[in-house]
Image (tube, rainbow, N blue to C red):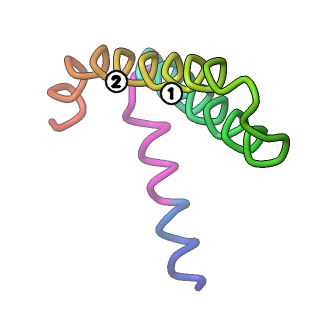
Amino acid sequence: MEEIIENLKNVHRDYMSKAPAQVRLLDAFLAFSFFTAGIQVLYMLLVGTFPFNSFLSGLSACAGVFVFTRKCLAPFAVVLSH
């Protein structure tokens, strides 16, 4: 277990030192979009599916934002791989 924690710390340290600020900002926005979709699914499971169209539109909006933001990160893939 300690080895896993140490590996995660190394990944975090490398990410913070090597990733540009723009990539970190976009990654934070992706995490927010994913978290928002998760909250919507949790709400649907707890409360019910009465306004199902609203649930679908909210989830689709989160998914669309996630996909298009991920597409914006594609030019940085070349920078990060070197």
As for residue 59 lying within the magenta part, the answer is no
- The C terminus: image quadrant: top left
The reply to whether dot 1 and dot 2 touch (C-beta < 8 Å) is: yes
| 72, 23: nearer the viewer | 72
- The N terminus: image quadrant: bottom right
Query: Where is residue 45 shown, x and y percent of the image?
Result: 74, 48
State the residue at coordinates (51%, 76%): 4
State the residue at coordinates (35%, 23%): 67
Residue 70's tag is 2
Residue 11's tag is none
| 74, 23: nearer the viewer | 74
Mark 1 surroundings within 10 Å by alpha-carbon count, few (fewer than 14), some (14 through 19), many (20 or more): many
Q: Label 1, on which residue? A: 30
Query: Where is residue 57 shown, x and y percent of the image?
Result: 56, 17
Marked residue nearer the N-terminal end (1 or 2): 1
Q: Under tag 1, what secondary structure? A: helix
Magenta residue span: 10-20
In this view, 3 is above or below 56: below
- Left/right of residue 78 with respect to residue 46 in the rendered view: left
